[in-house]
Amino acid sequence: MAQVVKLALVGFGRVGRWVAWDLAERGRRIEARYGVRLVLESVITSRGALHRADGLPMDLFRSERLRDHWVPLEEFGWPVDRSRAGLEGVLGSGAQVLIEATPTDLESGQPGLDHALAALGRGIHVVFLNKGPLVVAWRRLREVAGGSGARIKAAGATAAALPAMDLGDWCLAGARIELIEGILNGTTNFILTRMEEGMDRAAALAEAQRRGIAEANPRLDLEGWDTAAKLLILANLLMEAELELQEVPVEGIQTLTAEEVRAARTRGEVVKLLGRAVRRDSRVEAAVRPVVLPVDHPLAGVRETTKAVRLVSDLMGELTVIGGASSPAAAAAAAVKDVINLAREGAVGA
Ligand code: HSE
């Protein structure tokens, strides 16, 4: 008998729609491989919800047109329940796991923060794609989850298909992580690669936007905030850093010129936007800035939209992981991975 895991998806933008499509496409295969049946009970937006207590018919989400473009909920071919819009939907869905895929707001954490607190307070596990709540209110989320026994998963909020969180959480379990360093933003790495080849920043950004990896507000990528958010979440969850975003000096690539990037190359160096968190005595210091690396540095060859993370621990040494696709599909798959792993950890399933 497969374990049944009931899911609610909040937020139905570019990545949220991919989550639904992914569950529809891969649900059978996941059940056969892991013995876990992922049942999507609700898709919740601010305008209303698609809901059925024993699971929505997944054929609703198989259309590529509905997956790839914003369309009103009405077009999915299922009655839209207005009473379940937003927070009401989150509380009333009967789900065991909430996938939080509303847009990231690094100042207020909303609306995802209220969704997550409401869910965690009721013992519903939360799988984050949205970075905002984790950046703004990690301590509160941890306390509320601790009180109810709910778990928090954040692979989709920390470079997604690059397994930065799982590497620290699972592969280095028990070890003390001394340093986290990485190229955590695909958009800026793509722009730096193209600038090195002679393309200007605006054209490279437009291409990253076309590929669907840039933030809705691309300043979050260019000015280093997306890197800082991912670094902060990794440092807080893996190094118990207790960092606030305002404590992290953040410098982006918005003022770098193509000449500077190409000049580094002619000197045998490369410019990379690096996030770095390092343990110093009893505290962790973090910063984001463009750095010039020698071409033989482990992160120098990370190009295009590829990301990478390097972790250094006390007893298990140094690990570098490079790769994982950068795309809405890959981000959605990272959230599905977190749900599968919640079931494998025994946190959910009936
Ligand atoms: N804008 C991000 C990036 C994707 O370019 O890596 C979402 O985290």
Image (cartoon, rainbow, N blue to C red):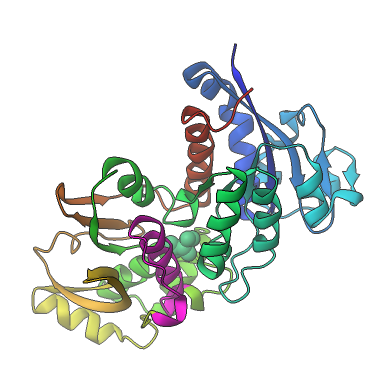
- State which quarter of the image contains the C terminus: top right
- From this view, report whether residue 207 is shown above or below residue 20: below
- From this view, report whether residue 46 is shown above or below residue 331: below
Q: Quadrant of residue 307?
A: bottom left
Chain part drawn in magenta = 221-247
Instruction: Please name whichever residue, 336 or 247, is drawn nearer the observer in this view of the structure.
Output: 247
What residue is drawn where x is 65% and y is 43%? 123
- State which quarter of the image contains the N terminus: top right
Please, what is the dominant secondary structure of the magenta stretch?
Answer: helix
The answer to whether 58 appears left or right of 104 in the picture is: right
Residue 167: give x, y in percent of width and height: 31, 46
Residue 240 in the magenta stretch? The answer is yes
Q: Is residue 75 visible?
A: yes
The total of numbered circles placed on residues is: 0
Residue 344: give x, y in percent of width and height: 47, 28
What residue is drawn where x is 56% and y is 67%? 137
The answer to whether 93 appears left or right of 289 in the picture is: right
Residue 227: give x, y in percent of width and height: 40, 69
Q: Quadrant of residue 314?
A: bottom left
What residue is drawn where x is 91% and y is 50%? 83
Residue 152: give x, y in percent of width and height: 53, 48
Residue 39 in the magenta stretch? The answer is no
Q: Is residue 185 visible?
A: no
- From this view, report whether residue 59 is shown above or below residue 326: above
Instruction: Please name whichever residue, 302 or 98, is drawn nearer the observer in this view of the structure.
Output: 98
Q: Quadrant of residue 140?
A: bottom right
What residue is drawn where x is 8% and y is 63%? 296
Instruction: Please name whichever residue, 349 or 328, is drawn nearer the observer in this view of the structure.
Output: 349
The answer to whether 227 appears left or right of 123 in the picture is: left
Q: Residue furthest front?
A: 147
